[in-house]
Image (cartoon, rainbow, N blue to C red):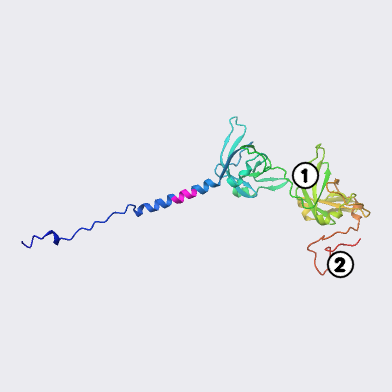
Amino acid sequence: MSATHKSQSEFPSAVIKKRAKLSLIWLVPAVAAIVAAVLVFQNVKKIGPTITIRFEDGGGLQANQTVVRYRGVQVGSLRSVELTKDTKHVEAVVRLNRSASRLARTGTIFWVVRPEVGAAGLRGLETIVSGVYIQAQPGKETGPEQKQFVGLEDPPVIPPPLDGIEYVLRTPANASLNEGSPIYYRGIEVGSVRYLQLSADSTTVDIHVSIKTNFAPLVRNETEWWNAGGIKVNFHFFGIDVGAENFKSLIVGGIAFATPTNYSSIAQSGKIFPLHDKSEEKWLKWSPVIPITNANPVAPTGGLPSLDLNQPQKQ
């Protein structure tokens, strides 16, 4: 046999390898699909009920941007906002988070928070940056479920929590008092205005005030109250006297009261007093001795006995 002809056994044998059934190129999209599925599942778990809120005006409301808040936390989002068929209102479709499902019950109220500047002060200024939002206030937890709501055009009057003894001051009209206006006794702040409302017959304004519990003994059945806000101008023969209770009352308004030297029992919570436009000179001369406790929690230690109001005073 010539050298040019070789047997088959002298040639190298081919090695046959089995091809992998799953290529690594498919691993990346598979992982991405799994991650996407997990994210979708988590979002579905957060989805709560969808409700519709009807407003008179939809100014500032934007689909997929406006949020719903409760206690400062986002609890839902606006999915769409459209005019009603009669074009007299707007309907906002809101999707609540699952954790806020109980808001979709009878008694819950909604209103739009917008920046406002008025005589009552500044409100909603945070919306200048974040945009307007829908505020929610839940009703009773035992109420039936509800899907259709009518939103309020103005924020509701929600009295702040009572922290003290409440009294009602009645006046023909309100001039300068607002929620939170301070109440003074001898120039010391002892309470504040909780809220204001018209009386049941709408002939007067009822100002609900709260006096701190430790100062409650200062309020007696004979106590006189007057408006201490603004600037007081008195004309007399020798000139003009201009004054104010203090700088804070000059800005936000305020109330002062005095109790006569000869006083009776402590006024009961809820008692109605008249609110005068200004004080009488004799009221400012009253000097009753009324024991109080913990009048000043931050009174300086080691001071004169007359400054130490942390101990009960003897009558």
Q: Secondary structure at mark 1?
A: strand
Residue at which label 2 appears: 305
Q: Secondary structure at mark 2?
A: helix
Q: Is residue 234 left or right of residue 31?
A: right
Structural distance between the alpha carbons of marks 1 and 2: 39 Å
Q: Please tell me which residue lies in front, 68 or 187.
A: 68
Decide which of tag 1 and tag 2 comes sooner along the chain: 1
* Residue at 86% over, 55% down: 217
Q: Residue furthest top?
A: 86
**Local crowd at mark 2 within 10 Å, few (<14), some, or many (≥20)?**
few
Q: Residue furthest bottom?
A: 302
Q: Is residue 80 left or right of residue 172?
A: left
Q: Picture quarter containing residue 196? A: top right
* Residue at 80% over, 68% down: 301
The image shows residue 272 at horizontal and vertical percentages of 85, 45
Q: Please tell me which residue lies in front, 294 or 56.
A: 294
Residue at which label 1 appears: 196
Q: Residue furthest front?
A: 9
The image shows residue 125 at horizontal and vertical percentages of 65, 49
The image shows residue 135 at horizontal and vertical percentages of 64, 44
Tell me the quarter of the image containing the N terminus: bottom left
**Kind of residue sitting beneath label 1:** Leu
**Kind of residue sitting beneath label 2:** Pro
**Local crowd at mark 1 within 10 Å, few (<14), some, or many (≥20)?**
many
Q: Which residues are magenta?
A: 34-39
Tell me the quarter of the image containing the C terminus: bottom right
Placement of 202 over or under 99, stated as above or below: above
Q: Answer whether residue 92 is magenta in the image.
A: no
